[in-house]
Image (cartoon, rainbow, N blue to C red):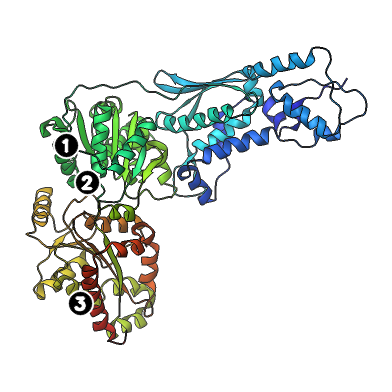
Amino acid sequence: MINAWIPTRRPHYKTERKRPINVEELFSYLEKETDSVQYDRKFFYFPWAHEQVKIWQRNWKKHNGYWEQNRTHRVTKFKLQFPQFAHEDLEILKKSGCTVTFEDGAKEKLEVITKTASREFSITVKTVDDCLRIRWNNEFNRWFHSLFNVFARYMAIRSEDDPEADYISCLNQIGHQELQVEYWAAFRANHFWSVVQQTLEESHGPPMFDLQYEPFQPSSRKYDFEIQPNYTLRSYQQTAMDKWKENRYFGSIQLPTGAGKTLIGIDAIRHVHERTLILVPNLALVDQWVDLTSKFLSLPAKRIGIFNGQKKAFRDYPVVISTYQLLSQYLQDLHAFEDKNNPTTPLREKMLVEDTIGFFTHKFGLLVADESHHIQADTFRQIAVDLEIPRRLALSATIEKSVHSSLVIATMGPIIHQISYGLLAREGFIAPIYFRRIHIPLTADEKGILNQKGKKAYGKVSREATNKLLAIRKLLETPLTSQTLIFTSRIKHALKIHSYLFDHGIETTVLTGDTVLNDRELNHILDQFRNKKIHTLVLVKMLNEGFDAPADTIIVVSGTRNRREQIQRFGRATRPGKVAKLFELIIDPLELDYEFEVAQARDISDVIEPHVQDLLLPPNIKGEIEKVVDDIKISFYGRET
């Protein structure tokens, strides 16, 4: 008699039988995904997990010619280690030329065993003590070790923007056949095991193993407070909220600037109705969220807590708004106290830090992260990892497909809804966009400087080209540009632009960290701009994002290669009710291609869809703007261009 063990044709089965599942080993030896595109697919391509589980299932059952090699012409008896695959194995025997016969009652007995065989290999995934626990029996441990390799790969997130960087550990082994998922990663684990469950259910025959799966469900953190909503969501906002609820109140929503992401966050507060923490990147957004939350939920402003450098009132409030900066500083202090090898020197007393972070960790039921791409920053990522806040909503116009964006997806949830500028402009929800790059020629003196100093002068000459000042002035002198933001990359250059325009009778206000002394002065300037008492602001980094004001024109004089920065800057002018005029001034690439290459790196044509926007522009306004642009070109190059 020949005992034919079916696992002989499963890759690596001998290794799996000898070694117990060890999570640390899985992460330690996890193959680095040096292909950034493949790494990104894991987070931004939703069916990735479905593909990988099906590949694993197919490979585990893959035939490698075992039956063909051992075929004989005499009667062969064999023992099935996995009766649930009996139908497939018998088909292989038949295809290899064997005649299959059954002893009396064997066929009926095999059918009964087949239906129950998967129960011998069991795994349980469920919530235990407010944590997601995964347990498996010894038979599962012996035969399905490779499934955890797929799980570890799915959960692996790099700590840095480097293909060779270590992965952030999110699985802890708490027993020989039991592991626990870190709180921040539990919802991502939810998706993986739901995919496994779906794959097993879709199997044509009996499942490979018995999976008892209950989605991670943290305890409720109710907080009584009264609200009276007085708003109506737009159709795409309602769709976003429906998808967020379907995904168990966990996910990221990516909408263009000006599309009303704040109102979606306010609606999330209404649905969850638990104590809510809202994270924002700057003080201007703190005030904006206070005003809009109070307005749309009829929640008195005095019932909204603040946690920033100026005010720390957060304990007895149903909604608390905090800056990323301050909360991350407290977390850094906490880690410095807990880890003696941490080089960071705590800035606050230990008792104060522990008490504050303890409150933020355990008292909130909903986390809303506005401009959530900030979570990717090294200094802020600990917020999403350390705070055990179960329901999460990430809002951003710019969740880029990069390594660090994977941290946003892993801790705040997958991108469950996104919509394009073109579609929103067609529906009238944001302003139609006129976008043009204007090529600026260098003067003879500037060309001489480049000839003398070479590459080290490229940046300064490109940024501060004399003809850029002329182009700015001509754009501001047209009545089509009434409320304008001018962006440059250096404070000295911002002051130079201000001085030049002042000398030519154009009033401007410079808004930088050096020129604005405090938040009171900043808010005063912003109010004047909103009330159209100030018509032009010259900016460096300030107001790149989160500034809600009636700007109709953006002029980018110089900038970085950062696409996100470009999207945020242009988004300052896309509020509905006008035409958003966006101009990018770059040195003519025929004279110097340095700035053109930088501009290409930050190009967002795929985001704002200028070919679509041009069709939406009123013909008369488009014609007037084109005439202004043509006049600028003629002043530089002459009529023949």
Specify the farthest residue to the top: 105
Which numbered disc, 3 or 2, marks the residue closer to the eye? 3
Q: Residue at x 62, y 22 (%)?
A: 140
Three-letter amino acid code at the position of disc 2: Asn
Three-letter amino acid code at the position of disc 3: Leu
Whole-percent x and y of residue 80? 76, 21
Residue 102, labelled with which disc? none
Q: What element carries label 3?
A: helix
Pointers 1 and 3 in contact (CB under 8 A)? no
Q: Earlier in the sequence, mark 2 or mark 1?
A: 2
Q: Mark 1 points at which residue?
A: 296
Specify the farthest residue to the right: 74
Whole-percent x and y of residue 634? 26, 83
Image quarter of residue 610:
bottom left
Image quarter of residue 238:
top left
Q: Is mark 1 on a helix, strand or loop?
A: helix
Q: Earlier in the sequence, mark 3 or mark 2?
A: 2
Q: Mark 2 points at which residue?
A: 282
Q: Relative to residue 485, is residue 202 drawn left or right?
A: right
Which numbered disc, 1 or 3, marks the residue closer to the eye? 1
Between the residue at mark 3 and the residue at mark 2, the CA separation in whole angstroms equals: 33 Å
Classed neighbour count for the residue bearing mark 1: other residues with Cα under 10 Å, few (<14), some (14–19), many (≥20): some
Three-letter amino acid code at the position of disc 1: Phe
Looking at the rendering, in which quadrant would you find the N terminus? top right
Q: What element carries label 2?
A: loop
Is 213 drawn above or below residue 299 in the view shown?
A: above
Is 179 drawn above or below residue 594 in the view shown?
A: above
Looking at the rendering, in which quadrant would you find the C terminus? bottom left
Q: Name the residue under label 3.
A: 470
Q: Relative to residue 302, is residue 470 drawn left or right?
A: right
Q: Which residue is drawn at 34% across and 35% down?
A: 242
